[in-house]
Amino acid sequence: MVESLHSANFLLALETEKSTLRAFIEILKKEENALIQGIIEEIDHLASDKSHLVERLLKLDEHRNEHFYNQGLPPGRNCVSTWLKQQYPNQPEIQIAWNELLELARIAQKFNQSNGLVISAYLQHNQQAFAALQCATGNISLYNPKGQAYFSAQT
């Protein structure tokens, strides 16, 4: 009975983590779409939601790792599947939930990396455009020490 309750709580924790990861992936998909369409306001809004979900995922991950540690499982994911089979031999739904969690994490990682590459490309483009504008205008001071706009003449 105690093992059943223990496994039910663990399965519930995995399901909660999976649900949160799914929400995170949806945010990443929306972010990808906003990046493609160049909708900066949407990206700003999504960044806040994304940040909250990352915080939640970190707490869930910490809780799960604490559970593993308390069960004597060494850190790292390499031995988790084997440990789960040994710990819960008559409950394949736990192994299935774990595998689904790992797959969702891989999907989230791919979206996050892809979005990061797009953001880096935008940043590089903007930096190049800014550098080109600086070169085109020469070495111009835009504000004097009093904060007033002025342009220095090239001699």
Image (cartoon, rainbow, N blue to C red):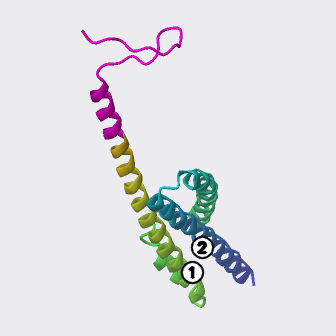
Task: Identify the residue shown where x is 71% and y is 83%.
Answer: 4
Cα–Cα gap, marks 1 and 2: 8 Å
* Front one among 10 and 151: 151
The amino acid type, in three-letter code, at marker 2 is Lys
> Circle 2 is placed at which residue position?
18
Task: Identify the residue shown where x is 54% and y is 65%.
Answer: 30
Instruction: Give the vertical position of 45 relative to 132 (above or below).
Output: below
Labelled pair 1, 2 in contact (Cβ < 8 Å): yes
Q: Nearer the viewer, mark 1 or mark 2?
A: 2
* Front one among 152 and 64: 152
Residue sticking out furthest to the left: 155
Residue 118 in view, yes or no: yes
Say whether residue 153 is magenta. Answer: yes
Q: Which residues are magenta?
A: 127-155
On residue 97, which mark appears?
1
Which SS class for mark 2? helix
- Left or right placement of residue 144 versus residue 7 in this view: left
The amino acid type, in three-letter code, at marker 1 is Ala
x and y percentages locating residue 15 in the rendered image: 64, 76
